[in-house]
C-alpha cells in the first residue's frame, strides 16, 4: 500500500496515499469525537462522507472550511481542526 | 392633522420604521403585510448603513439616518446586530483618489467623519485588497445591521394591529384586502418597495434586480464594508446592467458579496452570467475572495426612481395616500430618516431635514 505523510494539528502521520483528509484524520485519531465547535459551542464532526452535510470542514494548508471528506490527501499537507486548529469556524 | 388611524401597506424596514415613528407620535397603526415582517427587499439586502453623497439630498437623508441608526443600534446592539464597522471606499486610480479628497469635504460639511486614506493606510485597514491601489476614503460612522430583525423589533414596539393579507385596492379612506374585507383609515401609507406600482400604476418606480452571495465564516478577512468608489457611478446612474465591488463583514464572520443591478428582469432566478460578472469584479479588487467557500446565492428587487431619491410624502393626486417607497439600494439606511420625515409631515411638526427633495409631487405635473 502506497503511503505518504501529512501533518494533522502539527503532528506528522503516515496514511494511505489514496485516502481523503477525512480518512487520514480517522486513521490518526480512532477515538475521534469532535473536529469542530459550532457557533453555539456544540461538538461537530464528519457525518455523511459524501460532501453533503458540511460537518467535516477543516483547515487545509491554511485555507479554512475545506471539506475533509472530499479532499484527497497529498504529501506534506497541513491539516488543522478543533482546539488545535480553527475551533468555532 | 391630529393623529388618528393609519394603515401602512408593507412590513419591510421602511413600513416598520414608519409604523414605529407614527405610533410614537400618537397614531393608531394597522400594518398589512402579505408575507412576514422584514421579508422582501429587507431580507434580501445587505443591511448596510451608509452615508452616500451622490447628490446633496442623498447625503442629507443618509447622514440623518446614519445618526439615527447609531442611536438605535448602540442602545440595542444585539437586537439589531449593529456593527459599527465603517466603510472603506477604494479608489481604483489617482482620478478617483482626487475625487475621494473632494468627498472628504462634503462629508465633513454634513457633519460626518470622513478620512482620506493613502495607499499605506488603505492596506493597513484592508490588507486583502489587491496590490497597487492608490488609496481611498473611510467613513467610520457607517455600520451593518440585521435588517429583518430590526424591522421586527421596530414593529413590536408599536403595539399596532398586524393583518396578514394582501391589499388589492386603495380607495379614499381605506383599503380593500384580498379576502374582500375593507379597512378604513384617514391615512394610508404605501411602503411596498418595488411592488408599489401594483397598487398605484402611475408611480415612477422600476424594480432593479440584484444578486447577493454569502460565504462561510472567515472572521478578520475584512474589517469594514469595502466597496469601489466607482460603485455610485456603476450602480446608481447607469440605465444598463452593472456590477460593482461591494462586500461586507457580518457579525458571524461571514462575508456578504455584492453587487449587481439589472432593470426590467421580473423573474427571481439566479442569473449565472450576472453572478459571474459580479464575482469576477469582486475578485479583481480582492483576489483572496476566490478561495472562500460560499453558502448561498439569492436575488431581490430594489425600488428605483428616475432621480435616485425616494418618494416620501403625500401623493399629490390621491387624497389620503402617502408614499414611503423608491429607496433603491439605500432603504435600510434611509428607513429611519424616512419615518421621521413622514411623521413630521403628517403631524405638521418641523422635520429634522428639508422634505422638499423627496416629495412625490416632483414627478407629477400640477393640474
Image (cartoon, helix red, strand yellow):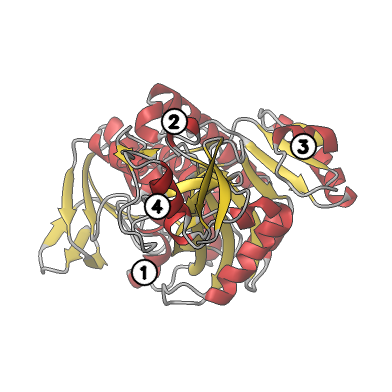
Q: Nearer the viewer, residue B273 or A22?
A: A22
Between residues B105 and B347, which one lies in front from this camera angle? B105
Quarter of the figure with residue B178: bottom left
Q: Chain of mark 3?
A: B
Give neighbour class at mark 1: few <14, some 14-19, many 20+ (Cα, 10 Å).
Answer: some
Mark 2 highlights which residue?
A83
Q: Are marks 3 and 1 in contact (CB under 8 Å)?
A: no
- Point out the frontmost of discs 1 and 2: 2
Q: Earlier in the sequence, mark 1 or mark 4?
A: 4
Query: Mark 3 or 1 closer to N-term?
Result: 3
> Residue B14, image x and y in percent?
39, 48
* Helix, strand or loop at mark 2: helix
Mark seen at residue B122: 3
Q: Is residue B324 above or below residue B221?
A: below
Q: Which residue is mark 1?
A: B200
Q: Position of residue B267 (x, y in %)?
A: 42, 77
* Disc 4, SS: helix
**Which quadrant of the figure contains the N terminus of chain B?**
top left
Parent chain of label 2: A
Q: Where is residue B41, by image quadrant?
A: bottom left
Report the residue at 68% width, 62% height from top: B281
Amino acid at each position: 500500500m502506497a503511503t505518504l505523510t501529512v501533518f494533522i494539528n502539527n503532528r506528522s502521520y503516515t496514511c494511505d496515499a489514496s485516502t481523503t483528509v477525512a480518512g487520514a484524520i480517522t486513521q490518526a485519531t480512532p477515538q475521534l469525537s469532535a473536529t469542530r465547535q459550532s457557533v453555539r459551542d456544540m461538538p461537530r464532526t464528519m457525518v455523511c462522507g459524501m460532501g453533503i452535510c458540511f460537518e467535516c470542514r477543516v483547515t487545509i494548508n491554511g485555507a479554512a472550511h475545506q471539506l475533509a471528506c472530499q479532499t484527497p490527501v497529498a504529501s506534506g499537507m497541513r491539516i488543522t481542526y478543533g482546539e488545535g486548529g480553527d475551533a468555532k469556524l | 392633522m391630529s393623529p388618528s388611524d393609519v394603515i401602512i401597506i408593507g412590513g419591510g424596514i421602511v413600513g416598520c420604521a414608519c409604523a414605529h415613528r407614527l405610533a410614537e407620535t400618537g397614531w393608531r397603526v394597522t400594518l398589512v403585510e402579505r408575507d412576514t415582517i422584514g421579508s422582501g427587499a429587507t431580507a434580501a439586502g445587505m443591511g448596510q448603513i451608509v452615508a452616500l453623497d451622490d447628490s446633496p439630498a442623498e447625503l442629507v437623508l443618509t447622514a440623518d439616518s446614519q445618526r439615527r441608526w447609531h442611536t438605535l443600534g448602540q442602545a440595542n446592539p444585539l437586537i439589531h446586530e449593529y456593527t459599527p464597522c465603517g466603510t472603506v471606499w477604494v479608489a481604483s486610480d489617482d482620478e478617483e483618489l482626487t475625487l475621494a479628497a473632494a468627498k472628504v469635504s462634503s462629508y465633513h460639511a454634513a457633519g460626518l467623519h470622513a478620512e482620506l486614506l493613502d495607499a499605506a493606510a488603505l492596506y493597513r485597514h484592508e490588507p486583502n485588497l489587491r496590490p497597487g491601489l492608490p488609496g481611498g476614503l473611510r467613513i467610520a460612522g457607517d455600520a451593518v445591521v440585521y435588517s429583518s430583525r430590526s424591522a421586527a423589533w421596530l414593529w413590536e414596539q408599536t403595539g399596532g394591529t398586524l393583518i396578514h393579507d394582501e391589499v388589492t385596492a386603495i380607495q379614499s379612506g381605506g383599503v380593500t384586502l384580498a379576502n374582500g374585507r375593507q379597512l378604513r383609515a384617514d391615512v394610508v401609507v404605501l411602503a411596498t418597495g418595488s411592488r408599489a406600482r401594483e397598487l398605484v400604476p402611475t408611480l415612477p418606480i422600476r424594480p432593479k434586480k440584484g444578486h447577493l452571495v454569502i460565504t462561510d465564516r472567515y472572521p478578520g478577512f475584512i474589517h469594514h464594508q469595502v466597496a469601489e468608489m466607482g460603485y455610485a457611478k456603476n450602480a446608481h446612474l447607469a440605465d444598463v446592467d452593472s456590477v460593482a465591488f461591494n462586500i461586507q463583514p457580518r457579525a458571524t464572520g461571514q462575508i456578504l458579496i455584492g453587487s449587481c443591478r439589472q432593470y426590467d428582469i421580473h423573474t427571481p432566478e439566479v442569473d449565472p452570467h450576472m453572478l459571474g460578472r459580479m464575482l469576477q469584479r469582486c475578485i479583481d479588487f480582492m483576489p483572496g475572495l476566490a478561495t472562500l467557500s460560499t453558502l448561498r446565492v439569492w436575488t431581490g428587487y430594489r425600488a428605483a426612481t428616475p432621480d435616485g431619491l425616494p418618494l416620501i410624502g403625500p401623493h399629490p393626486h390621491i387624497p389620503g395616500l402617502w408614499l414611503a417607497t423608491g429607496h433603491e439600494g439605500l432603504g435600510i439606511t434611509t428607513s429611519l430618516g424616512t419615518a421621521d420625515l413622514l411623521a413630521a409631515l403628517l403631524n405638521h411638526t418641523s422635520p429634522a431635514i428639508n422634505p422638499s427633495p423627496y416629495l412625490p409631487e416632483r414627478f407629477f405635473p400640477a393640474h
